[in-house]
Image: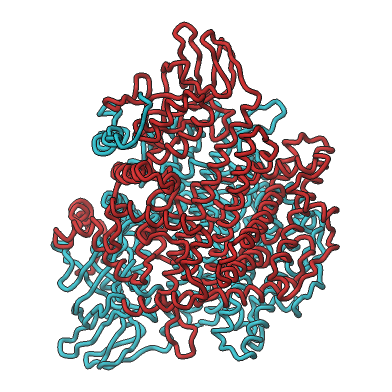
Chain colours: A cyan, B red
Amino acid sequence: MTNRNVQAMDEARRSASFDSKKMAEAIYGREEHNRHITAFQRVEQALDTADNMKLPPCYRDMNRQELLLEGLRTGKVVYEDGVDNNCGVFEYVTHHGSLANASPFGLMRFLFIPPVKQLGTDEQIAQWVPLAEAGKIIGSYTQTELGHGTQVRGIETTATFDKETDEFVIHSPTLSSTKYWPGGLGVVSTHTLLMARMILDGKDLGVHAFIMQIRSLDNFKPLPGIELGDIGMKMAYNGTDNGYAIFNHVRIPRTNLLMRHCQVARDGSYTSNPLRQKLAFGGMLSGRGIIARAATFQLAQALTITTRYSVIRQQGTLSPLGEPTAIIAYKHQHSRLLSLIAKSYISLLAWKSANAASADLKSRQERGDHSTLPYIHMLMCGLKAWSTQTAADGAEEARKMCGGYGYLAISGFPEIAASVTATCTFEGENFVAKYLLKGFDAKKLPADMAYMSEYETVAEDKEVCCAAGEDLLAHDALQEIFDYRAATSAREVHEAVKASERAGKSRLEAENTHALQLHVAARAHIERFILSAAVWQLNCLPAATPSAIKTVLGRLISLFGLTAIASPLEPFASSFLGYGYITSSHLKDMQKQIDDLLEVLLPDAIALTDAWSFSDASLASALGCADGDICARLLAWTRQLPINVEAAKNGGVFKKGWEENIRPFLNRDLSHLDVKAKL
Amino acid sequence: MTNRNVQAMDEARRSASFDSKKMAEAIYGREEHNRHITAFQRVEQALDTADNMKLPPCYRDMNRQELLLEGLRTGKVVYEDGVDNNCGVFEYVTHHGSLANASPFGLMRFLFIPPVKQLGTDEQIAQWVPLAEAGKIIGSYTQTELGHGTQVRGIETTATFDKETDEFVIHSPTLSSTKYWPGGLGVVSTHTLLMARMILDGKDLGVHAFIMQIRSLDNFKPLPGIELGDIGMKMAYNGTDNGYAIFNHVRIPRTNLLMRHCQVARDGSYTSNPLRQKLAFGGMLSGRGIIARAATFQLAQALTITTRYSVIRQQGTLSPLGEPTAIIAYKHQHSRLLSLIAKSYISLLAWKSANAASADLKSRQERGDHSTLPYIHMLMCGLKAWSTQTAADGAEEARKMCGGYGYLAISGFPEIAASVTATCTFEGENFVAKYLLKGFDAKKLPADMAYMSEYETVAEDKEVCCAAGEDLLAHDALQEIFDYRAATSAREVHEAVKASERAGKSRLEAENTHALQLHVAARAHIERFILSAAVWQLNCLPAATPSAIKTVLGRLISLFGLTAIASPLEPFASSFLGYGYITSSHLKDMQKQIDDLLEVLLPDAIALTDAWSFSDASLASALGCADGDICARLLAWTRQLPINVEAAKNGGVFKKGWEENIRPFLNRDLSHLDVKAKL
C-alpha cells in the first residue's frame, strides 16, 4: 500500500512538462524563494515540528487556554526569529502560512506599528516603534465595539480632555461601547492603539487614535479602571486572543494622542492637517495587499494538499478492466482542481502588479503627488475582496474535494479554510462600485476605465463576440470578452442609478436599490484588471525563463479566463451571458478548449503545487505528504492523539466517559419498558 | 441600547403580514409543531440550558475529551427522552437541531437499527433491535476504511468462514484496511454492524454485513484482537467519537452474519436472494430523506440568527439625515437573506412531497411492487444532494452576513455551518445523471422525464420564452423555464455522451468527459422537481389556511424561481442563459420583479423565521435572541467563559501565559540589538 502510494506520487511528479524549482523562481524570484525556504526551516527546527510522522502540537486536543498557550509558544519563536534574522517572512505570515495576526505577537507588525508610523509624530515613532519591533511591549489595535463594526463613525468610546491635569479620560459610556474583537487585547497585549471619540471643551471632534498602556509591565494586571477579557473560541485564530475591554474613566497623558496630522496643545486648542485622510490611506493599502497575498498563499496550501491526496486516493474505476482509478482522473475532480490552481497562480501574478502600483504610489506620495491614490485605493480594495473571496471559496472547495478526510482536524483543512475565510469581507467591492459611478460622473473617464469607451452604448443583444474555436484560447480574445462585460455592466448600472435619482431617490438610496448590479460591475472591473495584470506579468518574465514555464503559465491564464465565462459552476458566469455577446456556440467552443486545456495540464498538477510550497510541515496536514505516504502518516498521527494515548493506559477505555455516562446508560433501569431480548 | 434593540425586534415582529404561529401549523402541521416544542422544552429543562443568559455548556472551552464527555452527557439525556416519551423528535435530531448522529447514542437509530431491520432475519431483528432501542447495547456502523471511502467495492477487511468452529474470522490484512471514520466506533459503541469481504472456502463472495461485539460490557475494554481509537477533532460532531479499528483474527459466530437476503449454512454453503439489492435500498432512501430534512432545519436555524441580528445591528446610513440604519435595510443583506429564506421554505415543501412518494414506495414494496424504486431512488439522491448543498452554502453565507460575530463560537454559527456541511456530498447528483442517460436510452421516457418531450430538439438559440413583466411571477411561467433548461441540458449532454461513444469511448469514459454537463443536467432535473413539488404543496394546503399564509408562500416560490434564473450571484444561473431562451430583456424584467418581491417580503422576515423555530436555546447563539437583547447576552456569555472566570481569580491575569511565555518575551535579552527607546 505504502509503496503503491509513494510510487503513484513519484510518477505524478515525473509527468510534469517543466521543472518545479524553475517555476518557483519564476513566480517568487530566486532570492525570495530561498529566503522563505530557509526561514521555514529555521522556525520548524526551533519548534520541533519538522518530523512529519510526529503529531503536530496544534492537534494535541487542546482547549481554549491550551490553544492560546501554544499560540504564545509558537508566536514567540516566530517573532523572535523575525527580530533576530530580519528576513521579512514572518512579519506577514505565521509558521503555518496564515496571516501574522494569527499570533498574539504577530499583531504588532501588522496592526500596531503601521498606524503608529502613519499617525505618530517623528518623536512618537522614535518612542514606540523600536520598543514594539524589539518586543519590549506588546501592541494591539482597538477599534470595533460591541455595537459597532469597522465603520469608525459609530464608535462611542470617549477620550475627554481634562485641561487641569493635561490628560485624556478614556471611558466606555454604554454597554454597546464595550471594545469587542481586537486581536491581542483581552489577554496578551500591554499597549493598544485606541480609537476613541475626542471631546474637547464638551465638543465632539470625532474619532482619533491614542496610545494607551492597558496592563502593568510588572505584574501584568489590567491597569485600574480597565476590565479585559477573551471573547472565546473562534473558527480559527485560536492561538491568539481576541478580546474585550471596558474603560471606567481611565487617564492617559495628552501626548499619547497620535499627533502627526492633528494636534491638541497644552491649552486644549485643536489643529488638524487637511491632508489627514489622504496620508492615512497608505498603511491601509499595504495592509490590504498583505492580506490578499496571505490568502492566496493559503489557497495554494489547500490545493497542495488536495492535489497530493487526489493522486493517491482511489475510488471506483474508469477502466474496462475494473482497475481502481485515482480520483484525480475524474473530470469533476481535476477540472475543479486545475481551475483553482489557475486562480491561485493568477491571483499571485495580479498581486505582483498591484503591489508594484502601490509601491509607485508610495514614492509619489513622498514627493507630494497623491494623484493616483483613488485608483490604487480602488485597486487594492477590489483585489483584496477578489483574492480573499476566491481563496476562501477555493480552500473550502479543496477541503470538500478530500471527502470525509477534509473534515478531520489533522487533515489541516479546517484550520486553513477557517482562517482564510476570516480575511474575507465584502467591503472592498463597495469602494470599487463607488469609484466606477464617480468615473462615469466625471467629464472624462479615468485612465483605468478608458477601455470602456470602446463599448459606448449599452448593448441590446446586438454585438456578438467574433472569436471562435482555438482563437478563444488567446489572451487578447479573453481580455476583450472580460472588457466587454465590465464596460457593459458598469454602464448599465450607472444608467440605472441615474434613472433612480431622476425618479427622486437620493444617491445612497439609488445605490442601495441597484446594489447587486453594482456588485457585479465592481467584480467585472477588477476581474478584467486581474486578467490583464496576469498577462502583463507573464510578458515581463526574464528572457532566460524556460519556455516550458511560459507555456504552462499561458495555459493557466487561458483556463482561468475560459472557466470564468463558460463554467456553469462559477458564480458570476451568468454576468457574461446576459447580453447576447456570448452565444451557445461560443460556450460549446469554450467547453471544448477547456477540456483540451485540462487534459494537457493534468500531468502538471503536482509540479504546479510543488512549485509554490515552502515546507511540508507548514501544511500541518496528514494528507499533504509530499512523498505520498498518506495512510502511514494518518494512522501514526491518529495513534498519537492524547485521547488514544490516555485510553491505552486504561486498557483501551476512555475512563471518564465509561464511568460517568456510558455505564449508567447501559445499566439504566428499564423496568418501565417491556424489553424481552436478552444479551 | 438594550431598549432600542428590544424595541427594534418588537417592531420587526409586528410588521408581518401574517401570524407566524399559523405559518408554523401550515408548514409542519399543528400536531407535529406542538410535539417538537414540548420535546425541546423537556430536554432543555433536563439539560439546564433553558436560561438564555447562562453560557451554554458547549462553549465551556473544552478539549477533545471534554467535548466528548459533554456529548455523552447530553446524548444520554436526549436518547433516554426519546425512549421514555416515544415522541420521534430526537430519533433524527439532537437538542441543537443537528443530525442525530452528532451524539454517540443517536447513531443507533440512524445507522445501526435501520440496516439490522433491513438485512437481518426476523429472529435477528427480535434479538438486536429491542436491545439497541432500549439502550442495552450501543451500536455503530462500520464500513469505510483508511484506503477506501463510501464505495463498498474497495473494502479489504475480511470475514473468513471457519467451518470447524462455525465462526467467521474478522481480519484487517493491510494498513489501508484499517476501519476509519465510523461514528461511535472508537470509544463508545459496544457493538457494530461491520461490512467485510466474506471468504468461503477461499472464495471471495463480496461485501456482507455482520454484527460484531467489539467491547466487553463488563469492563468496556476492546475485545481481544481489536485495536480501537478516536480519530480526533473534527470541524463539528465533536460530541461523538468517530473512530478507527484494526482487527487481528477476531472470531464471531456464523449466525452474526445478517441473513435476511443471503445465508451461510452450518456446512458453509451459500445462498442469496436475487432481490437482495432492491430490498436493501429502502433504508438508505429514508436515511437520505432524514438528512435532507435535518440540513434544511439547520439552514433555518442559521437564517433565524442572521435575520434577528440584521434587524438589530446598525451600520452606516441610508438616510439623508445620517441616522444609523439597520443592516437588514441594505439590499445586499436582505436580498441574500430573503432568497435563502425562500430556499429553506421551498426545500421543506419539496421534502414533504418526496417523503410522501417515498412512503408510497415503501407500501408498494411491501406488496412486492418495486416499479417506482428507480425513480424514488433518483429523487431522494437528488433531493439530498440539493438540500444539503443548499443548506451548507446557505448556512455559511448566513454566517458571513453577521460579519465578525459569525466567526465567534458563541454566535452558534461555526457549529451549525460546520455540522451541516458534513451532510453534503456530491454522490447524489451522479445517480440522477445516470438515471437521465438511462431514461433517454430507453424506448420511452420514464414518467418523470415526460415533460422533456415538449422540447424535442436541442435548441439552437431559436426558441424564446414568451412570458414578460409581471407574468414572470407566475409559478407556471417559472416552471416552463425550469423545464426548458432541464430538458435542453439533459438532451444535449445525452447526445454528447452518445457522440463520444461513437468516437470509440466506453460509456464510463464518455460520462467522465462530460461530467460537468451531466452535473448541470442532474441539478436542472432535480430543481424542476423541487419547484413543482413546492407549488403542489402550496395547492394542497387545507382550505382553512389563512390567505395571507398562502400569499406569502406563493411569493417565496416566485422569489426562489426568479433568483435561480436572474441572480448573477447564483451558481448555475448561467445554465438558464446559454440557449437564448432567456434574453437580456427577460433578465431586466425578472430583476424588477425580484426587487418588488423583496420589498413586499421584507416586513415578513422576522415572522418567517419565527414560524420555523422551536426554541431559542436550541440555537445556542448569543446573536439569535428572539427578544433582540443581543449586546447583553453577548457580554454576559463572554464574561462567563472559563478563561475569563479563571483570570479574574488572578487579578485579571492569564497566569500560565504570563509566566511561561509573555514575561520571558518581554524580558528577553536584547543586547544583540541596538534598541535606544526606553519605556
Above or below, A212 relative to B492: below
Give the image quarter of residue A225: bottom left
Give the image quarter of residue A197: bottom left
Residue drawn at the location 53% of the way across and 62% of the way down: B26
User: Where residue A528 sits: x, y (%)?
Assistant: 65, 67
**Number of callouts:** 0
The quarter of the image holding the C terminus of chain A is: top left
Above or below, A487 relative to B166: below
> In the rendered view, does A236 fall on the left or right side of B376?
left
User: Where residue B335 sits: x, y (%)?
Assistant: 56, 71
User: Where residue B233 sits: x, y (%)?
Assistant: 38, 43
Above or below, B361 relative to B16: above
The answer to whether residue A327 of the structure is visible from this angle is yes
User: Where residue B43 sits: x, y (%)?
Assistant: 33, 51
| B254 or A189: nearer the viewer | B254
Residue drawn at the location 30% of the way across and 58% of the way down: B50
Q: Residue furthest top?
A: B164
The answer to whether residue A17 of the structure is visible from this angle is no
Residue drawn at the location 78% of the way across and 54% of the way down: B488
| A178 or B481: nearer the viewer | B481
Residue drawn at the location 80% of the way across and 72% of the way down: A461
> In the rendered view, does A661 fall on the left or right side of B390?
left
> In the rendered view, does B192 fall on the left or right side of A346?
left
